[in-house]
Image (tube, helix red, strand yellow):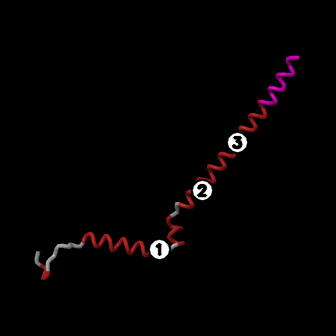
Amino acid sequence: MTARPNLVLGDELARAEADLEQARERVASSISALRDEVARQADWRRWLSRHPVISVGGALALGFWLGARRRPHHLEIGGRR
């Protein structure tokens, strides 16, 4: 009669291992899909190609801002300090 409990325990163990393997595969698949989506969302070239007007406007604004920072603001009239 001891063979029956061992057989049941073995079946339950095999089912649990199969369930665990399926869970691992689902997690691996989810991680892979998440990695692909993050890479797609973080692709700056794609974003620039989808928003060209905003990209050019942002580049112009940044250029004006950087240029204004380098220009001396304390010059008096006539070029004297």
Residue at image mark 1: 54
Residue at 52% of width from left, 60% of height from top?
42
Q: Residue at point 70% right, 42% down?
A: 23
Q: Which mark is residue 23?
A: 3
Q: Main secondary structure of the magenta part?
A: helix
Amino acid at pointer 2: Asp
State which region is magenta: 1-12
Please tell me how crowded label 2 is: few (under 14), some (14-19), or many (20+) other residues with Cα within 10 Å. Answer: few
Is 8 contained in the magenta span?
yes
Q: Nearer the viewer, residue 44 or 79?
A: 79
Q: Which mark is residue 36?
A: 2
Q: Quadrant of residue 20?
A: top right
Local crowd at mark 1 within 10 Å, few (<14), some, or many (≥20)? Answer: few
> Which residue is nearer to you in this view: 74 or 11?
74
Q: Residue placed at 20% from the left, 72% from the top?
A: 72
From the viewer's perspective, is 32 left or right of 5? left
Q: Position of residue 32 (x, y in %)?
A: 62, 51
44 in magenta: no
Q: Residue at x 66, y 45 (%)?
A: 27
Name the secondary structure under disc 3.
helix
**Which quadrant of the structure image shows residue 77?**
bottom left
The three-letter code of the residue at mark 3 reads Ala
Q: Real-space Cα distance between discs 2 and 1?
A: 25 Å
First of labels 2, 1 by sequence position: 2
Q: Amino acid at mark 1?
A: Ile
| Residue most extreme to the right | 1
Which tag, 3 or 2, sits closer to the chain's start?
3
* Element assignment for label 1: helix
